């Protein structure tokens, strides 16, 4: 989970107690019923798929790195239109880009 972001409510979806959470939900259906429409959700592919609704925006991080394991994860993204894309950046020998995408 890492550190809290400034000026944001820290909402966590987890089946185990998370002391740093301002609000914690134990199941996805309760989270979806209680989260506001302007919330920003940070998570992996499984959680993201639950919120892929037409017209929503996603901030996508693409990491340009070959995996050194056989445990690869295929992520299927919905059809999107790129609104903005960053230049390629590097951190500790790993390159990545950010983009803002509107789900079609």
Image: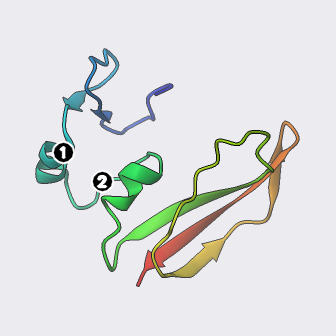
Is 94 left or right of 1, judged from the image as shown? right
Report, in whole angstroms, how far the alpha carbon at label 2 lies from the one at label 1: 11 Å
Local packing at callout 2 (Cα closer than 10 Å; few below 14, some 14-19, many 20+) is few
Question: Which of the colour schemes (rainbow, by chain, secondary structure, one colour) is used?
Answer: rainbow
Compare residues 85 and 48 and report the one nearer the observer.
48
Compare residues 73 and 34 and report the one nearer the observer.
73
Q: Extreme right residue here?
A: 93
What residue is rendered at 15% in x and 48% in y? 29
Image coordinates of residue 71 in percent, x first then y, are 64, 41
Image coordinates of residue 68 in percent, x first then y, are 79, 40
Q: Quadrant of residue 97?
A: bottom right
- The kind of secondary structure element at disc 2 is loop
Q: Quadrant of residue 61?
A: bottom right
Q: Quadrant of the C terminus?
A: bottom left
What residue is rendered at 26% in x and 17% in y? 17
Q: Is residue 24 above or below residue 77?
A: above
- The kind of secondary structure element at disc 1 is helix
Compare residues 6 and 89 and report the one nearer the observer.
89
What residue is rendered at 56% in x and 79% in y? 83
Number of dots carrying numbers: 2
Q: Is residue 57 above or below residue 32?
A: below
Compare residues 65 and 12 and report the one nearer the observer.
65
What residue did someone put label 2 on? Answer: 39
What residue did someone put label 1 on? Answer: 31
Is 6 left or right of 29, judged from the image as shown? right
Q: Is residue 82 above or below residue 48?
A: below
Residue 20 badge: none
Image coordinates of residue 27 in percent, x first then y, are 19, 38
Image coordinates of residue 67 in percent, x first then y, are 76, 45
What residue is rendered at 50% in x and 25% in y? 2
């Amino acid at each position: 989970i890492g550190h809290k972001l400034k000026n944001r409510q820290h909402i966590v979806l987890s089946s185990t107690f998370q002391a740093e959470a301002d609000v914690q939900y134990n199941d996805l259906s309760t989270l979806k019923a209680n989260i506001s429409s302007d919330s920003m959700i940070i998570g992996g592919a499984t959680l993201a798929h639950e919120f892929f609704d037409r017209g929503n925006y996603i901030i996508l991080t693409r990491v340009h790195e070959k995996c050194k394991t056989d445990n690869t994860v295929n992520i299927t993204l919905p059809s999107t239109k790129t609104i903005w894309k960053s230049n390629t950046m590097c951190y500790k020998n790993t390159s990545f880009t950010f983009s803002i995408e509107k789900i079609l």
